[in-house]
Image (cartoon, helix red, strand yellow):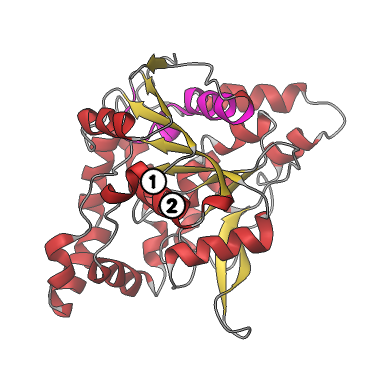
Amino acid sequence: MMMPLNLGSLPTSVGVVMEVKMNSKGGSDRHKALVAGSGGEFPSFLPKEVEKIKDPFARSLAKRIQRLPVQMGFPEKCIMSSCIKPVIQSKHSPVVLLHCFDSSCLEWRCSYPLLEEAGLEAWAVDVLGWGFSDLASKRYHLYQLWKSYIKRPMILVGPSLGASVAMDFTVNYPEAVEKLILINPNAYAEGTRRLAKLPPVIAYAGVSLLKSIPLRLYANALAFNGTSFHTILDWTNVGRLHCMLPWWKDATVSFMSSGGYNVGSLIKQVKQRTLIICGENDQIVNYKLAVKLHCELPNAIMRQVADSGHLPHVDKPNCVANLIAGFALCDQPSKGLLIKK
């Protein structure tokens, strides 16, 4: 297990990443992957507010974000879709990292370099309409991106509401998914419910509130444990960076109006081997719901991350990277508490 973060400290992955940089020889692929985003400029499509972010992992990963054209329907209709492409080519199944509701691939800033250091071919993908991509259908877009660029059965990772995105995708495109990893899964959320019926004026006003710093600060305070105010403030700026894009409000209102994700009826249709990762101190998704999901999934194991909250891939990246790598490479996560059915 990892030790809790010290107040005001960077995530403990700093030591691991720095060690790899110092010990790598001859410009290996893993070394290149870790330093790929350390220099250069930010992509021009990112909001200018990215310059104000202090987190070195967020700054490094942001420099690696690129947009790929993904064909949607007719040949002339392509969506420019944001993601982090792997530097490493691996014989093992690629690992594709989704993110939480109204977030971006920068959510993986702490864990991503550790996954590459472990030799995994990792993609961090923005769910369409969130992150830094343009607008369109989420499920079909992910399939088209997979079909165009990844092309092999993948290990699909979804945190929080991203777990619902992952399960919905897996049931509809089972040939694309070899295994599932769900992190503090919000699998029993019943869509956006009453929010889907809000008049447009009220819906847009609510979305403006969702963008506000006080609300985001509060959400981050719930999500992270034992982290200083200055660090949480910086992480809040990372988490709301995509909100500065001109289409963000339209995308969020569109998602609310669509009814959102309600995958409860799909759970027992997920046949793939599944790892559920839970933060011990998650204050957003009730632990009992994760246990319930563990019991209902036909082929699942469950691990718990000590002293972690709703986003263990941010505040306990070493542990989460070990769990993902162990499950991806040999089906046995190497650390964490195994919870049997």
Q: CA distance from mark 2 to mark 1?
A: 6 Å
Q: Which residue is mark 1?
A: 269
Residue 78 on the magenta segment: no
Q: Say what amino acid the circle numbered 2 marks.
A: Val
Residue 160 seen in this snapshot: no
| Residue located beneath label 2 in the image | 171
Label 1 CA crowd tier, 10 Å (few <14, some 14–19, many 20+): some
Q: Residue at x 54, y 17 (%)?
A: 334
Question: Which stretch appears magenta?
Answer: 308-329
Instruction: Left or right? Give the position of 213 relative to 134.
Output: left
Residue 44 vs residue 73, the one in the foreground: 73
Q: Against 241, is 258 above or below?
A: below
Quadrant of the rendered image containing residue 30: top right
Which residue in the rendered view is the most extreme toward the right?
26
Q: Is residue 279 above or below residue 144?
A: above
Residue visible at 45% across and 59% down in the picture: 131
Q: Amino acid at mark 1?
A: Gln
Marks 2 and 1: CB-CB under 8 Å?
yes
Picture coordinates of residue 290 (x, y %)?
28, 32
Is residue 240 among the parts visible in the rendering?
Answer: yes
Image point (57%, 38%), residue name:
112
Q: Nearer the viewer, residue 286 or 93?
A: 93
Q: Give residue 233's position: percent from left, percent from top.
A: 33, 43
Rendered location of residue 292, percent (x, y): 25, 31
Residue 34: x %, y % from top left: 68, 37
Q: Where does the N terminus fall, quadrant-wise?
A: top left
- Tag 2, which secondary structure? helix
Residue under the point 47% across and 50% down = 170
